Each structure stands twice: as structure tokens, then as C-alpha cells.
Amino acid sequence: MLRLAVLVSGGGTDLQSIIDEHKKGNINCEIALVISNRKSAYGLERAKQAGIPTACIKDQKELLKKLQDEKIDFIVLAGYLAILQEDLIKAYPNKIINIHPSLIPSFCGPGMYGLHVHEAALDKGVKVSGATVHFVSEEVDGGPIIYQEAVSIADLDTAEAIQKRVLEIEHKILPMVVRYYCEDRIRIEKGRVHIL
């Protein structure tokens, strides 16, 4: 069975969506570890409540060592607000998945996280937003796109309202993609992802 590590920096609602689907028996892996770069991240408490081992690690060399020591097979970034270093990405090629709160390539890249993404969408007046699950590469938000889902935001006028609606999409598609990964249904051909 694959051993999953989830990296969080904040509240951990995306983590919770994975835990919930795992408890229902829909995700066939072991959630082996939840790691945060912030001691105050509520995601650590969510993991403890679910009986999942946790760690708080800021240094990425130490992080990589911990992942390797724990024999982690793949990694999910669920609201992890740090750019992964090259060594870590190279150690897990196409084995790191990220959720981003927009339809990449819109509103992504360095500095585009959390409410910043939804503020940018509001400023541009876009009518549709959504969420993207993608593999992590050395380009920020630049790895192959695995799955995207769109949602209308035409009726919303605050970044917080957009965030709330997009989070509903995130909580649906992130555990779904984790399930597909565990079922070995994801293939990359010529930079494009296919789900079997």
C-alpha cells in the first residue's frame, strides 16, 4: 500500500477532505504523515484527531530526510505555503500533487496563493474560476495539470466569497485525484495527463 504524506500550512480543510474520503474507504493508501512548516497550523490538529503522525519542519533538507526515512511514496500539498526546493522535487518526480485555487494558467505562479488568487480574479472581473490539481515541477504551478473543475463566480463580489465557493471544488477534486493516483490510473504522455 502506498504511503502518503500531506503538507499543510494552515487550517487543513483540504487535508480533512482527504481524511474523510479515506475513512469512507474511497482512498486506498496509508496517510502516513502530515507535516507543516508552521507550528500553529490547525491542519496538524486535524491529523492528530485522525490518529495520523505529525511533524513541524521548516528546513527543506530536513523535510526531505524525514520523507525518505518514513518511506513516503507520494506527497500532497494541501495549502502548503512554501516553494519546494529542487532537491525535493527531483527526489519525487511526478509524485508530488498540489491543489491550486484557480484554473491554471490563470492567477498562478509566485505570490499567487490564498486570498491573493481570488482578489486577482475579482480585480480582473472574471466570471468563472475553479480549482486545479497538478503535479509539482520546478516551475511554480507549472507542472502537468491532472484535473480542473470550473465554477461560476459571476454573482460574487468579495474574495472571501469566491474562496468559499472554490474551496467546495477543492474538497471534491483533491481526494478524487488522490484516489486515482492510488489506483494507478494517472498517466503522463508528452506533458499531458490522462486518467484511465
Image (spheres, rainbow, N blue to C red):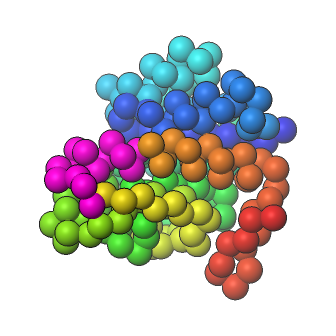
Q: Tell which residue pokes out farthest to the front in this image.
A: 155
Q: Quadrant of residue 90?
A: bottom right
Instruction: Please tell me which residue is depicted at 57% across the width and 50% down the height of the picture.
Output: 173
Prevailing secondary structure of the magenta residues = helix
Nearer the observer, 88 or 3 = 3
Nearer the observer, 166 or 60 = 166
Residue 72 seen: no
Instruction: Please tell me which residue is depicted at 26% across the width and 69% down the height of the picture.
Output: 126
- In the picture, which quadrant includes the N terminus? top right
Q: How many marks?
A: 0
Please give left or right for residue 97 compared with residue 14 in the image. right
**Which region of the structure is painted magenta?**
154-167
Up the image or down, 86 lies above or below 8; here it is below
Residue 99 seen: yes
Up the image or down, 22 lies above or below 165; here it is above
- In the picture, which quadrant includes the C terminus? bottom right
Please give left or right for residue 111 compared with residue 133 in the image. left
x, y (%) of residue 78? 48, 44
Instruction: Please tell me which residue is depicted at 73% across the width and 53% down the height of the picture.
Output: 181
x, y (%) of residue 72? 70, 42
Is residue 163 found inside the magenta-colored segment of the image?
yes
Instruction: Please tell me which residue is depicted at 69% across the width and 24% down the height of the picture.
Output: 23
x, y (%) of residue 17? 55, 34
Q: Quadrant of residue 37?
A: top left
Nearer the observer, 150 or 134 = 150
Is residue 26 found inside the magenta-colored segment of the image?
no
